[in-house]
Image: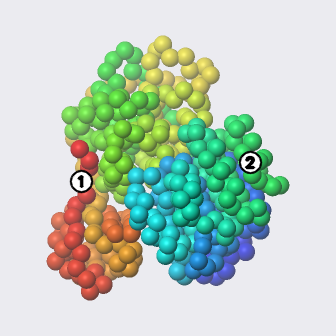
Amino acid sequence: MAAFSTLSLGPAWLANLAQLEYTEMTPIQALALPAMLEGRDVMGQAATGTGKTAAFALALLQRITPKSGRPGALVLCPTRELAAQVADEIRRLARPLAHTRVLTLTGGTSVQRERASLDHGVDIIVGTPGRVQDHLQRNRLDLDGIRTVVLDEADRMLEMGFIEVVGQILQSVPADHQTLLFSATFPEAVKELGATYQRDALHVAAPQDDVKARITQVVYDVGGGDRIAALVRILAQHKPDSAVIFCNHRETCDEVATGLSTAGYAAVALHGGMEQHDRNTVLLLLKNGSLRVVVATDVAARGLDIDDLGAVINLDLPREADVFLHRIGRTARAGRSGLAISLVRARDDLRNTPLAGIEISPLPAMQANEPPPAAMVTLAIQGGRSDRLRPGDIVGALTTEVKIAAADIGNITINDRISFVAVVAAVAPRALEGLNAGRIKNKRFRAYRVSTPG
């Protein structure tokens, strides 16, 4: 693998990448970044977890001028969850570029708050097509300064009916902008999108076989038996630290989550029928290691971004092969190995599926098992970027004032008005008490434990 130091990036950028533990480029980064840094249009085939977000984020950050009065980059995403994750990654990578302001424009959030942020000036917009178009139509958003447009997960935007809206948005962008398009799959409609809005684009693809080679696939025959009982056996056998169980219907998600909860597993459903706040909470807890099992539909799981997911379990097989690969690729991110488990019945025809040729195993024997609790607890702090809080401030308060070891502190997420920190479960009561009794940056903030929805 090539090192980031081989790129035309300054010392401050390389130092920040090293601090983030980004030293060697992933295949998609090595293929795409040199051309993107030169300002060339790129069409990249890359699934979740291949490092594509960091690739286009580094590229667009080289082409913006902070505090210029209008945004210089626009990233369009199919879902609000993905938009939030992309914005967070851009903020982390933008540290060498002082005063860079990143704003998400998505449905389910306050339009008035977004408008106030636009009035104060932003440098990078990350949004869903519908909300971005709404601000454009109301003359709240000026795209005349855009130098880079990113279309992320273009195939999903196509499936969700956003492509026409994307086209209308791109008509408001200067003609000489750079267009970066990323997609896990490339149906004809996505190729046509690239042909319409890109110029002399370089086509690159992350090696699919590399991801598949790092995934151990196990297929279990559940016969005509109870699939929830089968899941209990499987979880007891493999003991993954975290798992996402995929179902094709939201009703199945609720049924399975309830059944696993009855069996002692802290399982939570994740689907489009839930309130947005509850979906965000589930994603946060799973990412932080504060939740072990999530039962999800493909649509809801699009916002799932976990570096080290223990296992993916297909309770229902997806109807399309590329969806299957997208699912299991969530458990082999950033060069790690992964485990993918699929449940099949004897009547299933697997000849033309990604499971063809994989040996089918009988279900593991029932065993006494006490499902372990989650390793981490997530605490919320009622303060955020608007209070000038940074991750270092929270770490400092926990290590210096509360005397929590730095090794017991996990992910930290800073939003505009609220922040989240994951801590090892054993020290969570002391951390919570200390945060409420003490100060961060000489100011008191209320803290509380984040619970699972429902």
- Check disc 2 and report its element: helix, strand or loop: helix
Whether residue 293 is visible to the viewer of this picture, yes or no, is no
Number of the label disc, if any, that sits on residue 79: none
Number of the label disc, if any, that sits on residue 451: 1
Q: Closer to the N terminus: mark 1 or mark 2? A: 2
Q: What residue is at 35 percent from the left and 72 percent from the top?
A: 384
Find disc 2 in the rendering and name its residue.
194
- 10 Å neighbourhood of mark 1: few (<14), some, or many (≥20)? some
**Depicted 364 relative to depicted 186: above or below:** above
**Depicted 124 relative to depicted 277: above or below:** below
| Horizontal side of residue 108 vs 255, given as left or right | right
Q: Quadrant of the N terminus?
A: bottom right
Q: Nearer the viewer, mark 1 or mark 2?
A: 2
CA–CA distance in space, label 1 to label 2? 43 Å
- Check disc 1 and report its element: helix, strand or loop: loop
Mark 2: amino acid? Gly
Where residue 398 appears, x then y in whole percent? 27, 76
Q: What residue is at 50 percent from the left and 66 percent from the top?
A: 103
Q: What residue is at 77 percent from the left and 53 percent from the top?
A: 198
Q: What residue is at 21 percent from the left and 64 percent from the top?
A: 448
